[in-house]
Image (spheres, coloured by chain):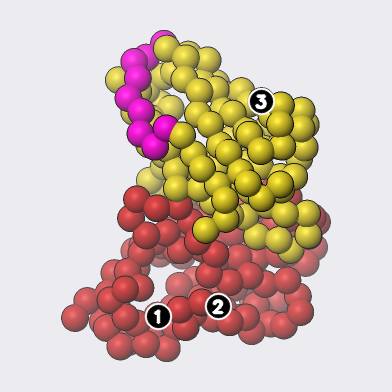
Chain colours: A red, B yellow
């Protein structure tokens, strides 16, 4: 069964600094992986998805993630944080038809001046 | 936003009362899901549907039932609400493609007193 682990429930960065949010997966078959963002009192919005076409995936708002099979990782990065990036971020994974996704426990990103 | 509407947006109910949450979509997608979101747990799948009258359990299905009599509507029922079911409930939909992402509604905040 697919499982997803997000390391760090809270991450704080300064505005303009690199954002790195960590996600590791466990799967015996190639996974489908997603990053979602949730702003307060809203549903989850898709940031990006990995579907084996390319290991480096670019998403919205300047975010990208790199799939590393050797490390079973799919970490989310952004070169320069903006105040508007403050939100909760979820990694999710599935296998097969990806009809059921497993979500990580989320990482809350704080951006300080 | 994908055409997903959850109702009600907020509800307060008493322990032991039945509660039904509604999810309505206008995308004609086959897959529909109910998740609950709780601090420290991320999103956990309650039930999902892969077609009219076709449903299956998720990882936290105890105390919940669902029905899907039409493609566009997916109902979640708490037969006898308990305080442990106080949570934010999200509906999601997904297209048929194997790498199609989930699209989420804005959630229903349920408080059981």
Residue that numbered label 1 is attached to: A19
- Disc 3 is placed on an element classified as strand
Tell me what residue is drawn at x 78 percent, y 60 percent: B98
Tell me what residue is drawn at x 39 percent, y 37 percent: B9
* Count of numbered tags: 3
Q: Nearer the viewer, mark 2 or mark 1?
A: 2
Density class for disc 3 (Cα within 10 Å; few <14, some 14-19, many ≥20) is some
Q: CA–CA distance between discs 3 and 1?
A: 42 Å
Q: Does residue B44 appear in the picture of this structure?
A: no
> Which stretch appears magenta?
B8-16
Q: Are marks 3 and 1 in contact (CB under 8 Å)?
A: no
Left or right relative to A43: residue A57 = right
Q: Are marks 2 and 1 on the same chain?
A: yes
**A53 or B24, which lies in front?**
B24
Chain bearing mark 1: A
Rendered location of residue A23, percent (x, y): 54, 67
Residue that numbered label 3 is attached to: B67
Tell me what residue is drawn at x 78 percent, y 59 percent: B97
Q: CA–CA distance between discs 2 and 1?
A: 14 Å
Chain bearing mark 2: A
Rendered location of residue B94, percent (x, y): 68, 52
Residue that numbered label 2 is attached to: A59
Rendered location of residue A82, percent (x, y): 32, 80
- Disc 1 is placed on an element classified as strand
């Amino acid at each position: 069964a697919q499982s997803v682990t997000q390391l760090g429930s809270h991450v704080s960065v300064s505005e303009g600094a690199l954002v790195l949010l960590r996600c590791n997966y466990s799967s015996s078959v190639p996974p489908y992986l997603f990053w979602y963002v949730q702003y307060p009192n809203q549903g989850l919005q898709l940031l990006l998805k990995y579907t084996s076409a390319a290991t480096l995936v670019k998403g919205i708002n300047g975010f990208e993630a790199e799939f590393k099979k050797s490390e079973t990782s799919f970490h989310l990065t952004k070169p320069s944080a903006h105040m508007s990036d403050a939100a909760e971020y979820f990694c999710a994974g599935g296998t097969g038809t990806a009809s059921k996704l497993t979500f990580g426990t989320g990482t809350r990103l704080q951006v300080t001046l | 936003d994908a055409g997903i509407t959850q109702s009600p947006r907020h509800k307060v109910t008493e322990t032991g009362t039945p509660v039904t949450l509604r999810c309505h979509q206008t995308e004609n997608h086959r897959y529909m899901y109910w998740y609950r979101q709780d601090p420290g747990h991320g999103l956990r799948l309650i039930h999902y549907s892969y077609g009219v009258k076709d449903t299956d359990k998720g990882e936290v299905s105890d105390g919940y039932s669902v029905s899907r009599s039409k493609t566009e509507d997916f109902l979640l029922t708490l037969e006898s609400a308990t305080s442990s079911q106080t949570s934010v409930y999200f509906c999601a939909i997904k297209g048929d493609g194997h790498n199609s992402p989930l699209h989420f509604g804005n959630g229903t905040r349920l408080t059981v007193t």
